[in-house]
Image: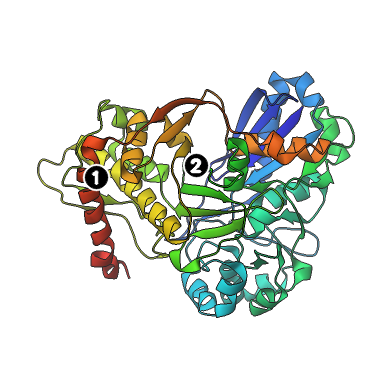
Amino acid sequence: MYLGLDLGTSGVKAMLMDDDQKITGSAHGALDVSRPHSGWSEQDPAHWIRATEEAVAGLKAAHPKELAAVKGIGLSGQMHGATLLDKDDHVLRPCILWNDTRSHKEAAELDADPRFRAITGNIVFPGFTAPKLVWVRNNEREVFSRVRHVLLPKDYLRLWLAGEHISEMSDSAGTSWLDTGKRAWSPELLAATDLDASQMPKLVEGTDAAGTLRSELAAKWGMGAGVVIAGGAGDNAAAACGMGTVGEGHAFVSLGTSGVLFAANSSYLPNPASAVHAFCHALPNTWHQMGVILSATDALNWYCGVTGRAAADLTNELGDDLNVPGPVTFLPYLSGERTPHNDAKMRGVFTGLGHESERVVLTQAVLEGVSFAFRDSLEALKSAGTKISRVTAIGGGSRSRYWLKSIATALGVPVDIPADGDFGGAFGAARLGLIAATGADPVAVCTPPATEETIDPDSALTSDYEAAYQRYRALYPAIAALSA
């Protein structure tokens, strides 16, 4: 048996998988996000441990024999979080999360240094780790002076699980300190932020063994000695391993809290000017590109809170058939935006509102706004040299067929829906745990699921969607100055 642990923004998911890659069971531990100021987003790392213990306890209660048979553990995690530890591995402050934009000025200053784009292959986004450390240096000097280790969220879990300061390539590529082509920390970029390699974790590939489970936890969970912990992956690379998106030409669209259009690459293809991320993949000698939008299902969840209605109720009101885009346009920039604008200060907007703009009209606008944000990412990927002919849909938002029809039509490519199963980050992490524990061939393990259904673009609405997308595109430059 193999255990996948996926540390997300809203919770930790624990999943058990057997040698045949059949899912035995899963459990969840909830997390909250603290937003003490506008643009801030934080979590207490101690809560990650509590949520992990809660999830594993759920598995133990339901599947004690299977949990006892675990030989490998894989980790998946939300990326970019700055987890700061002192010399005794005590947490110095709440972790600054991926969707925290307080360090936008620091990010712009680092990005103005041409070494960062040249070495990392990426824009220095406010959500990345390096500018957060510069913000801490500038605003919390006493904390900064005590920083002995900087860990990403899932790697803090590894420290608790195995007592090791280790990370891997896919997650570390999102820090702005990694030489992404060489797959190694850049001493030059670390020095530019008043840090050095001794404060960074050791680097391994996501398929490598990266510690063994501490005996105390093994005994508590009923496991034997020597349980291997894999290097693991950042959440999107882990999801790609779960989806089998590891080879050239494979792509997926993820409708999670954030939104991702992800394409696997067999070579390193950076193009920072496009605001596309060019990161290492979790498998050795592979890379990937992705466009990232900060509010995907988060935009619908926000709207649910405003209306007091459940997401399924809102989307069901739209009916089964895709509607012609209406006069209301929604920009889903509730936390700023990455691809293609790299704008931390921009905020969400409805335009075209009238007396006739009832709830169902606004629901449709929210879904279309996210669909058009994915279209922005597709255009950015094209400019970076990546062609996408079809995508597979994952994430909670993919349960809405209406939304998938909107995305297919906005992108102009078919959207495949995988057969029943859970192929997200926890499954990908379990696969990495299997590879690390057994030495299995990563490509043979990370195969794509069968396709249950394909949603094709609605050709009758292609021109209407194109016109609505061009209206959407024109809004950002027209109103960006208002959010400055």
Please, what secondary structure does the residue beneath circle 1 have? helix
Q: Name, please, the residue furthest toward the left.
A: 355
Q: Which kind of residue does numbered mark 1 sit on?
A: Tyr
Q: Residues within 10 Å of mark 2 (few under 14, many from 20)?
A: many
From mark 2 to mark 1, how far is it between C-alphas? 21 Å
Seen in the picture, residue 110 relative to 365 is either above or below; the reply is below
Please, what secondary structure does the residue beneath circle 2 have? strand
Seen in the picture, residue 414 relative to 39 is either above or below; the reply is above
Q: Residues within 10 Å of mark 1 (few under 14, many from 20)?
A: many
- Identify the residue under disc 2: 252
* Observer-nearest of 401 and 268: 268
Q: Which kind of residue does numbered mark 2 sit on?
A: Phe
Q: Is 362 on the left-hand or right-hand side of 385?
A: left
Q: Is 468 on the left-hand or right-hand side of 1?
A: left
Of pointers 2 and 1, the one earlier in the residue sequence: 2
Q: Position of residue 434 (x, y in %)?
A: 76, 35
Count the marks: 2
Q: Position of residue 322 (x, y in %)?
A: 25, 32
The image quadrant where one finds the N terminus is top right
- Identify the residue under disc 1: 465
Q: Position of residue 246 (x, y in %)?
A: 61, 44
Q: Position of residue 396 (x, y in %)?
A: 46, 34
For residue 6, which quarter of the picture? Answer: top right
